[in-house]
Image (cartoon, rainbow, N blue to C red):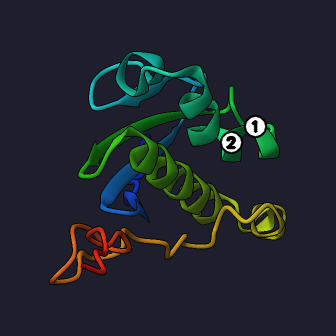
Amino acid sequence: MNVTQTVKPRTGRRKEAVARVRLTAGTGKLTVNDRTPLEYLSRATLVQHAVHALTVTNTAGKYDVVARVHGGGLSGQAGALRMAIARALVAEDEALRGLLGREGLLTRDARMKERKKYGQPGARKRFQFSKR
């Protein structure tokens, strides 16, 4: 009986970006919005950041990753992708939770952009003060 297992997508978030990742057994093929990670994220450092969970657990050649990312900028999307891949790995193999947790890959980075306040040009910046 050859039944394909349905894989539930895992979600990762960072700033305004949201990433949904589907992990399947395979050869290590990575796809982000139907493109290669380097083609989509455009910087090698962002790709390294995104696949950090696979590097730490030595599972880079073991799984195929299909990701859908939207919202935010490229840096936020790479962070969201990183978290989603880590969550998907834990769902696949619970033994990896300790290792990924120590690396801080399962913790949501709560830092967001500070809102602009009224009566000033930005969140912290003030208009120039004039005494006279």
C-alpha span from label 2 to label 1: 5 Å
Q: Quadrant of the C terminus?
A: bottom left
| Above or below, 32 relative to 89 | above
Near mark 1 (Cα within 10 A), the count class, few <14, some 14-19 or many ≥20, is: few
Give the percent coordinates (x, y) of residue 77: 39, 46
Name which residue type carries label 1.
Answer: Thr
Give the percent coordinates (x, y) of residue 27: 60, 22
Residues 77 and 101: in front is 77
Question: Residue reaching furthest left?
Answer: 118
Q: Quadrant of the N terminus?
A: top left
Question: Residue reaching furthest front?
Answer: 132
Q: Quadrant of residue 8?
A: bottom left
Q: Quadrant of residue 49?
A: top right
Q: Residue at x 23, y 52 (%)?
A: 71
Q: Is residue 76 visible?
A: yes
Near mark 2 (Cα within 10 A), the count class, few <14, some 14-19 or many ≥20, is: many
Q: Residue at x 45, y 43 (%)?
A: 75
Q: Which mark is residue 26?
A: none
Q: Quadrant of residue 66?
A: top left
Give the percent coordinates (x, y) of residue 92: 61, 58
Name which residue type carries label 2.
Answer: His
Q: Mark 2 and 1 residues: CB-CB less than 8 Å, in contact? A: yes
| Above or below, 119 relative to 103 | below
Residues 118 and 4: in front is 118
Q: Residue at x 55, y 50 (%)?
A: 82
Q: Which mark is residue 52?
A: 2
Q: Which mark is residue 55?
A: 1
Q: Is residue 1 visible?
A: no
Whether residue 100 sits left or right of residue 41 in the image: it is right
Q: Secondary structure at mark 2?
A: helix
Q: Secondary structure at mark 1?
A: helix
